[in-house]
Image (cartoon, grey):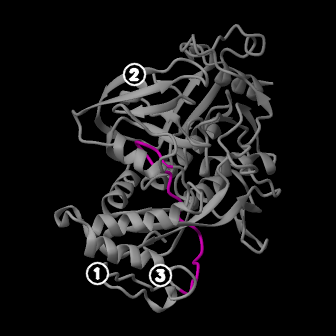
């Protein structure tokens, strides 16, 4: 599946990671095998562009080449990339993007879960570039950057209105180099400049532990819902992204959970933490869902004509009887929303936390000539019950069944995790 030239993808652009989703079936397009070969010096557009005003672009390119006074300043590759990027950005869709060779290469490197940068996932809200989530242990996390922060400037350059992939490119950089971000924690507040040193970021998809409730440092075991359950155990699974190695990691996790639940009756269930998960491969989302759901639809695709195509769960189903509570927040996007939404629609889990990001479209990815790439929005995705999380320009997201906010001034106490555990031990 990953070797297909054309692929379904869902993603939000991020400084340290880009959620990249491969679909579960092929798309056939008339231009499937089209490879553009554009000679900037040509004065005639290709036949497909010889209608309307499309020839103006070619006229401009020709005039630049023939008339511009500084011939050394004309970089044909840069001019061509700019022209293509302009065409794509005219759609006003942050998820339909043209990636020049370097950006496309950076994009692919992030899928392996290892890259150099500040480790902050980025998204768009209107024209503002916001932090979806800082990655654990990253320079961004250590500098106090938080989900929802607005990035006003990068190295003293205002970035509002810039395409997100350009912002990502400005923030990425070699390990050991310094970068200054001007951050606004809340709209209307005074912004402040934060200096960070880029580092190598290694992202592990999954974290798992099994503990007695009284031994979980981030919760208050004397809380009303936990006072009588301190010696009971819960299994905690954190899925931080859907990347190249997620399926292999998940297979080990699922087998471990299955074995522990069957051998230890004091385990009350699983807290599945999808907070600050920006997404990843779509087939990984379906694969993971299939462990919890016996049968039915994992996700539906709605095309431009309104036709809805369901994609069924398919897998071993090792954890279909295990009680589950899912944690979400505004950093949960795309594939993590697919998993959370499907688990709730199938009545396998309650959602606890905050409303998710609201990324509800599907992109198709194609490698172009010269190492460049193109991602085009082709459809919406819906939860099994037909819910679209992308309603509205910026997305409405999934609303939790139990809304819980975190105390930003007390990082040692995780009220959302505490409430999730209370739901398990009821």
Q: Does 299 lie within the magenta span?
A: no
Q: Where residue 408 sits: x, y (%)?
A: 59, 16
Position of 305 with respect to 379 (left or right) is right
Would you identify the image quadrant in which residue 232 lies? top right
Position of 343 with respect to 195 (left or right) is right
* Point 36% across, 40% down: residue: 171
> Which of these two is toward me, 365 or 249?
365
Q: Where residue 107 sits: x, y (%)?
A: 39, 56
Q: Secondary structure at mark 2?
A: strand
Position of 337 with respect to 170 (left or right) is right
Q: Which residue in the rendered view is the most extreme toward the bottom?
A: 47
Mark drawn on residue 55: 3
> Which of these two is toward me, 345 or 7?
7
Q: Where residue 413 sits: x, y (%)?
A: 59, 14
Please provide the residue range marked out in magenta: 13-30
**388 w.r.t. 46: above or below:** above
Instruction: Tell me the quadrant of the picture where the C terminus can be found.
Output: top right
> Which of these two is toward me, 375 or 256?
375
Mark drawn on residue 398: none
Give the alpha-carbon distance from disc 3 to disc 1, as whole Å: 14 Å
Q: Which residue is mark 2?
A: 193
């Amino acid at each position: 599946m990953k070797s297909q030239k054309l692929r379904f993808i869902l993603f939000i652009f991020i400084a340290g990671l880009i959620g990249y989703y491969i679909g579960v079936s092929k798309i056939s397009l008339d231009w499937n095998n089209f490879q553009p070969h554009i000679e900037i010096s040509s004065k005639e557009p290709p036949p497909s562009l010889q209608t309307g005003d499309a020839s103006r672009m070619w006229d401009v390119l020709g005039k630049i080449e023939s008339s511009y006074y500084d011939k050394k300043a004309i970089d044909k590759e840069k001019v061509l990339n700019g022209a293509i990027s302009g065409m794509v950005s005219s759609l006003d869709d942050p998820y339909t993007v043209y990636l020049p060779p370097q950006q496309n290469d950076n994009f692919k490197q992030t899928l392996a879960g290892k890259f150099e940068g500040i480790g902050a996932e980025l998204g768009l809200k209107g024209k503002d570039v916001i932090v979806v989530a800082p990655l654990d242990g990253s320079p961004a996390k250590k500098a106090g950057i938080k989900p929802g922060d607005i990035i006003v400037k990068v190295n003293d350059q205002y970035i509002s209105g810039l395409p997100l992939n350009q912002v990502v490119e400005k923030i990425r950089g070699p390990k050991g180099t310094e970068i200054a971000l001007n951050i606004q924690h809340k709209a209307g507040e005074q912004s402040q400049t934060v200096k960070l040193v880029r580092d190598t970021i290694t992202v592990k998809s999954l974290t798992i532990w099994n503990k007695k409730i009284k031994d979980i440092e981030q919760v208050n075991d004397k809380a009303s819902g936990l006072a009588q359950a301190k010696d009971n155990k819960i299994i905690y699974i954190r899925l931080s992204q859907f990347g190249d190695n997620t399926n292999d990691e998940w297979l080990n996790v699922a087998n471990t959970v299955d074995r522990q639940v069957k051998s230890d009756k004091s385990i009350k269930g699983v807290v599945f933490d999808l907070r600050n998960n920006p997404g990843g491969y779509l087939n990984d989302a379906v694969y993971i869902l299939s462990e919890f759901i016996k049968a039915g639809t994992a996700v539906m695709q709605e095309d431009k004509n309104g036709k809805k195509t369901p994609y069924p769960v398919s897998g071993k189903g090792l954890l279909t009887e295990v009680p589950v509570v899912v944690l979400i927040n505004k950093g949960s996007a795309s594939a993590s929303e697919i998993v959370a939404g499907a688990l709730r629609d199938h009545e396998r889990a309650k959602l606890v936390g905050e409303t998710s990001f609201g990324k509800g479209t599907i992109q198709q990815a194609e490698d172009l000539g010269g190492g460049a790439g193109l991602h085009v929005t082709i459809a919406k995705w819906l939860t099994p019950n037909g819910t679209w999380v992308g309603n509205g320009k910026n997305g409405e997201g999934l609303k939790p069944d139990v809304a819980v906010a975190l105390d930003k001034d007390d990082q040692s106490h995780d009220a959302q995790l505490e409430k999730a555990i209370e739901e398990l031990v009821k």
